């Protein structure tokens, strides 16, 4: 019967034959038909391109004489032309994207065999992610990130500056600031398979502050704008800097001859930029023992030359702290250029290298005055000219023979980035008016202005140079509209014994304060923001 037995070998007389030998005999049950193939199962779950799977059998026939043969194919239901292993477990090895069908033949050497049902191994593709953006982006505008995947239905994971993160395929960063510039990375995931990260670099450009406009300028119809006059605006210069790293790292200093260790391509600064200062920054500078830190020399060549410069006075080896910062006198490069970084030592001590500079950086500080651009609309519109002052008549934006008030909008522009616009008004006066003063003993104290009644913005002004106790007449013009006259006295005591009258071109009185000049102190004007309209009507009061 089955079991474990011991065999003893004897001679004919029943005695032991020489040295007693014992042989252990194990009796096992051989395989017999019908053979059961069992079931294939896997362990890896979802697979990605390049992964492998370990398959195993369970519930199959066992016993002496059983053997296995794994086979696989790429079509469901066979054929299975590819031979695999011969144990009850099978490792597929690395698999490319696709679906593979495995079967296992369970074979009894005494007769009979069975084949398992096929087992499908699906290998999913690893997505290829893509990333792009609308860079460069002006400060205050939106950053538009654009992600993509080679596999439909992918999910996305973005990361970037300022702890940015998003699961959107195409996220937006609204009203971006300068600190939002930098590298953004995205990965795509499909069926559990994660792509390598794709990246896009967003360059942020500063947006100038809005200009301050002169608000009003006026001429009379048929007239012209004198040279050097017109609508004016001022803008604050933009203060900025460029920090540029020399390519490479761990630059060595060997010997007393300066050797170029890195070359930096310096991009051009924005048009109109003026360099205010520049410096070279060195990081992780270490003198190799027994070299001295005081022996290290750095110089620059190419478009800007800096002679060999000592960066430390310490007479021993080791790191230099704090990191050296070297001023670059006379640096004024604004166009594209190249600068070489050179290193050497002042004394050849035979140590190679005698020092190592971890990294180097060029910092250029500059200011730039944005360009002023004039438009005929708050947004969009036609650009009629640039600079200050701006003459809309010469530019063709205004017909000087047609009276009216024309609104222009000025913006500051730098490197394609524009500020918000400020409004200014150009007036063509088609209504002549005269202002007659009878002055007192301090005629130079008297000034006047005519302002828009709705906005109080000054359009015409005069005075300040009148004689004492005299009659003075100023003639000016205004376009159709509603206006307000303001007469001011710097002495804060009115016009003692005098006054003023405002008339139209036909001599009709608009405002008559000829007898009330001493009835005010610093300001004389119609009460309750009162004003007058032009052209003048026929009603009188």
Image: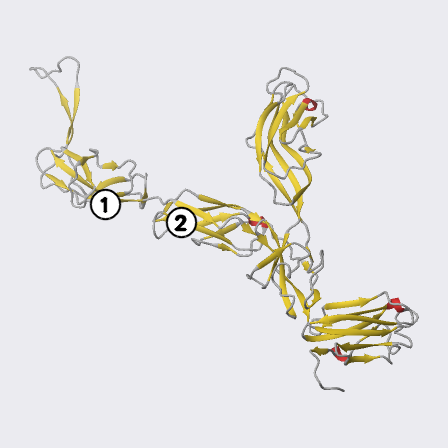
> Which residue is denoted by mark 1 in the rendering?
120
Quadrant position of residue 378: bottom right
Label 2: state its secondary structure.
Answer: strand
Circles 2 and 1 in contact, beta carbons < 8 Å? no
> In this view of the protein, can residue 158 be seen by the observer?
yes
> In this view of the protein, can residue 490 be seen by the observer?
no
* Image position of 298 with respect to 503: above or below: above
Residue 301 percent across, percent down from the top left: 63, 28
Label 1: state its secondary structure.
Answer: strand
Quadrant position of residue 122: top left
Q: Kindly report the distance in space between the C-alpha atoms of the residues bearing marks 2 and 1.
A: 30 Å
Q: Earlier in the sequence, mark 2 or mark 1?
A: 1
- Seen at 55% across and 55% down, the residue is 141
- Seen at 59% across and 34% down, the residue is 337
- Quadrant into which the N terminus falls: top left
Residue nearest the viewer, comparing 368 with 346: 368
* Image position of 152 with respect to 82: above or below: below
Quadrant position of residue 61: top left
Label drawn at residue 269: none
> Is 516 displayed left or right of 377 in the figure?
right
Residue nearest the viewer, comparing 5 with 284: 284
Residue 364 percent across, percent down from the top left: 65, 39
> Is 367 displayed left or right of 120 in the figure?
right
Label drawn at residue 148: 2
Number of on-image labels:
2
Residue nearest the viewer, comparing 2 with 162: 162
Seen as rendered, the residue at the extreme right is 441
Residue nearest the viewer, comparing 310 with 278: 278
Closer to us: mark 2 or mark 1?
2
> Is 536 displayed left or right of 170 in the figure?
right
Residue 90 percent across, percent down from the top left: 24, 36
């Amino acid at each position: 019967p089955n079991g474990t037995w011991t065999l003893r070998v004897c001679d004919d007389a029943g005695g032991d034959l020489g040295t007693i030998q014992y042989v252990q005999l194990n009796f096992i049950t051989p395989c017999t038909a019908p053979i059961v193939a069992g079931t294939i199962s896997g362990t890896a779950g979802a697979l990605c391109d390049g992964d492998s799977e370990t398959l195993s059998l369970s519930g199959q026939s066992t016993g002496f004489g059983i053997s296995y043969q794994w086979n696989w194919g790429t079509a469901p239901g066979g054929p299975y032309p590819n031979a695999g292993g011969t144990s009850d477990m099978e490792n597929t090895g690395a698999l490319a994207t696709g679906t593979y069908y495995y079967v296992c033949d369970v074979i009894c050497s005494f007769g009979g065999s069975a084949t398992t049902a096929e087992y499908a191994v699906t290998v999913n593709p690893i997505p290829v992610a893509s990333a792009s953006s609308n860079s460069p982006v002006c400060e205050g505008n939106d950053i538009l990130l654009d992600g993509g995947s080679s596999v439909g239905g992918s999910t996305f994971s973005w990361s970037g500056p300022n702890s940015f993160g998003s699961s959107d395929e195409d996220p937006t960063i609204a009203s971006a600031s300068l600190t939002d510039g930098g590298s953004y990375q995205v990965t795509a995931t499909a069926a559990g398979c994660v792509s390598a990260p794709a990246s896009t670099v967003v360059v942020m450009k500063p947006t100038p502050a809005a200009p301050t406009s002169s608000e009003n300028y006026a001429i009379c119809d048929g007239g012209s704008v004198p040279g050097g006059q017109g609508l004016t605006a001022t803008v604050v210069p933009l203060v900025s800097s460029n920090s540029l790293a020399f390519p490479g790292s761990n630059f060595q200093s060997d010997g007393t001859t300066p050797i170029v260790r890195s070359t930096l391509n310096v991009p051009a600064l924005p048009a109109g930029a003026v360099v205010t200062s520049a410096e070279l920054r060195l990081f992780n500078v270490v003198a190799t023992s027994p070299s001295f830190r005081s022996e290290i020399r750095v110089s620059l060549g190419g478009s800007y030359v800096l002679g060999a410069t000592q960066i430390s006075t310490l007479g021993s080896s080791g790191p230099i702290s704090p990191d050296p910062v070297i001023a670059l006198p006379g640096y004024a490069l604004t166009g594209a250029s190249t600068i070489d970084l050179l290193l050497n030592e002042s004394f050849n001590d035979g140590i190679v290298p005698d020092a190592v500079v971890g990294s180097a950086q060029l910092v250029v500080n500059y200011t730039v005055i944005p360009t002023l651009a004039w438009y005929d609309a708050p947004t969009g519109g036609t650009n009629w000219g640039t600079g200050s002052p701006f003459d809309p008549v010469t530019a063709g934006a205004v017909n000087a023979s047609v009276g009216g008030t024309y609104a222009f909008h000025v913006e500051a522009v730098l490197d394609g980035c524009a500020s918000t616009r400020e409004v200014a008004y150009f007036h063509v006066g088609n209504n002549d008016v005269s202002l007659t003063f009878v002055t007192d003993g301090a005629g130079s104290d008297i000034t006047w202005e005519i302002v828009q009644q709705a906005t109080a913005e000054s359009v015409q002004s005069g005075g300040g140079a009148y004689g004492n106790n005299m009659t003075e007449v100023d003639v000016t013009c205004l376009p159709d509209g509603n206006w307000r006259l303001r007469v001011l006295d710097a002495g804060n005591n009115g016009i003692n014994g005098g006054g003023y009258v405002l008339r139209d071109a036909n001599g009709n009185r608009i405002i008559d304060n000829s007898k009330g000049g001493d009835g005010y102190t610093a300001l004389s004007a119609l009460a309750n923001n009162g004003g007058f309209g032009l052209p003048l009507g026929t009603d009188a009061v």
